Amino acid sequence: MTALRNDATRLGTDGVTVGYADRVVLDNLDVAIPTGVITTVIGPNGCGKSTLLRTLSRLLKPRQGTVLLDGGDIARLRTKDVAKKLGLLPQTPIAPEGLTVADLVARGRHPHQSWLRQWSSDDAEVVAKALHMTGVADLAHRPVDSLSGGQRQRVWISMTLAQGTDLLLLDEPTTYLDLAHAIDVIDLVDDLHEGGCTIVMVLHDLNLAVRYSDNLIVMKAGSIVAQGHPSDVITSDLLRDTFGLQAKVIDDPVSERPLIVPIGRTHVVSKSDRHRS
Amino acid sequence: MTTAPDMHRGVRVGGWSWVWRPWNVLVTAALAALTFLVFCVSISIGDFTVELSAVVRTLVGQGERVDEFVIMDLRMPRALVGVIAGVALGISGALTQSIARNPLASPDVLGITGGASATAVFVVTAGGGAAIGGAAGLSTAALTGGLLTGLLVYFLAWKKGIDGFRLILIGVSVSALTQAITTWLLVLADIRDVARAQRWLVGSLDSRSWPEVWAALWVMAVLIVVVLVVSFQMQPLHFGDDVAAGLGVRYSAVRAVLLLSAVLLAGVGVSAAGPVPFVALVAPQITMRLTRSPVPPVVASGVFGALLLIGSDLIARTVLPNDLPVGVVTAIIGGPFLVYLLVQANVRRAA
C-alpha cells in the first residue's frame, strides 16, 4: 500500500490473491507500476506472469485484495471507463478471416463509441494516426490474415493504440516472432514509451527484457523476488535461483545494460581449454 | 477499393453516425428488393394466377375486392409466415455463428431445431394433436421445446464462459439425442399421427392463418429490436473474449442476451414453418460472401433467409412436382450455392 501512495503510480495491486479452482497463482501480491516507463514481468514458465498482467487488466478477478487504477478499485469501475484508460493486448489474438487492417484498428475505438455514435471524425483521425505510428498505414486494406507474424503484431498494437490510452498492457508481444521481427516489434513498443506511454509487458526473452525495460519485475511461484532497474536486478545468482539457469552476466557491448550469456551443458569452452590455446 | 489509408467514411444523420459501407448497403438493398419481388410473385401464383400489378395494387390498398380476398385472406399469410420464418432463421444463424466464432454453429447444430421437432412430434403422437388446440398449440410446443433444448445446451457448455467448440460438440450430442427421441416416438405412434408429424417435420408453409402471422411477427419484431441494439456490443466479440474485455465489453452478458435471442428466433422460425433445414446455416455464410464481410452480417442474413425460404417455397409449388416440402428445396438450392461460393473463393486465392 505504501508504494501506491507514490504519485508516480497509476496502476498497482494491493494484497492481491488470484487462483484457479484450488490452486493459488498469485499470493498476496503488492505491485506498483511506475508511470512513464517500460515495466517488464519476467519469470520461469508457470510463475504467474500472465496471471499478474491479466489481473492488472481486470480480466481476472482477485479472490482477495484490489487492483487500483488512478486510486480507484478497478473492479468497481465501469469496464468501458477502464478501457478508456488502459489498453490491453492479449496473447496471440485472432482476427476473423478476411478482416482488413483498417477495420481491425478501427475497432480499437469501441470504448469511445455508442450505438448512436458509431463513427466520428475523431475516430477517423485517431485510427489514421495509430496506423501511421505503427507503420502499417500502407497495409490498411490488406486482410490481417495475409500478413506476416511481425506485421500482424504491429496491427494489433495499432488497434490497442487506437483505444487512445497512455497505459498499455502487452502479454508476450513477441511470441512466435523470429528475432528480427521481435526486435522490430519491441522497438515499436519503445517508440510508444518515448511518446509518453506507460507500458507493462510480459516477455520470455530475458535479454530483450533487460535491454528495453527500465523496470523489471522478477517472479517465481506467484511471488515477486526482485524488482528494479535491470542493472541492479540481473545477477547470475538471481538467474540461478529464479530460473534454474546457469549464466554469466556481462556488460552488453552495444548498450549500457547487462547481457545474459547462458551456460548450457555442452559447447562451453572450459578454462583449461582456453589456457591451452 | 481505393488506396487511401482512411477507408472509413462516416455517415451522419443529426447526432447519429455510422461507418458508411456502400457495398454492404447495396447488396442488402438488392436482396431486399429481390425478396419483395419473389414475395409478390409467390402471392400471384396459386390455383389461379393474379396479375403481378394487381398484387402490388392490393398490397398498397388499392386492389379490387376479388383480388383482395384471394391475396389478403388466402395467400398473404403463407407468404408472410415464410418471410418471418426466413428472417428469424437467418438472423438466428448469424448470431450463433458469431457467438461461437464458427460457421458450423447454426441452430440446427446447437440442438434448437431438434428439440423443437421432438417436442412437436411428442405433442402430435402422444396428445393426439387436436386436443392441444391444433396448429397454434403445436407451434407453442415447438417453440418451448426449442427454447428449453437451446438453454440446456448453453448451460451444459458453460465452463467459466462459453467456448465455441465446446458449444458445438454439446449441441451435436444433444441434437443426436433429440433425433433419437423423435424417431422413437414415430416408431411407437399410431400411423395417422405419424403422417401428421411427418408433414410438420419436413417443414411446410401450407394453410397458414392471420393469427399465426401476427403472433410470430410480434415476437420476431421484439427480438430484432433487442438484437439490433445489442449487436453493436457484439462487434468486438469476433476477436475473442480477452480483446473484447480489453475494449470494455461485458462479453458474458452480451453473449447471453444474443444467444437467448438466437434461440428464441430459431424457435419462432421453426414453430412457424417447421424445422426447415439449412436456412440458418447457409444464409449467414452466403451473405458474408455477397457483402464481402468478414463476419456474418445480421440484417443481410435475415433478408437472405427470407429470400431463400419463400423462393424455395415458390419453386416447390411451381417447378417441382406437387407437395414437395420446402425444406427439400432450401437444401437443394442453398447447399450447392454455398459450395460454389467456397470453391470460387479458393480459385481466386490460388490465382
Image (cartoon, coloured by chain):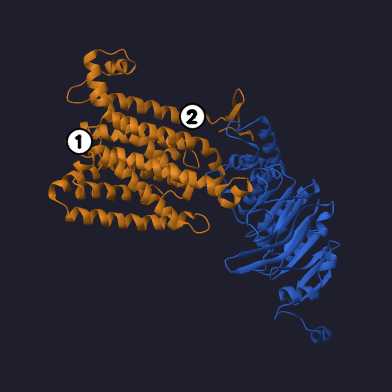
Q: Are marks 1 and 2 in contact (CB under 8 Å)?
A: no
Instruction: Identify residue for label 1.
Output: B320
In the displayed structure image, the side of residue B35 where residue B294 appears, left or right: right
The amino acid beneath tag 1 is Leu
In the displayed structure image, the side of residue A205 where residue B297 appears, left or right: left
Q: Quadrant of residue A201?
A: bottom right
Position of residue A107 measured from the top left corner of the image (x, y, whole percent):
61, 41
Badge count: 2
Using the image, tell me which numbered label, if any, was put on residue B25. Answer: 2
The amino acid beneath tag 2 is Val
Above or below B77: residue A76: below
Position of residue A230 measured from the top left corner of the image (x, y, whole percent):
82, 64
Mark 2: few/some/many CA within 10 Å (<14, 14-19, 20+): some
In the displayed structure image, the side of residue A30 where residue A75 appears, left or right: left
Tell me if I can see residue A195 in this picture.
yes
Q: Colour of chain B?
A: orange
Instruction: Between residue B11 and residue B13, name the one nearer to us.
Output: B13
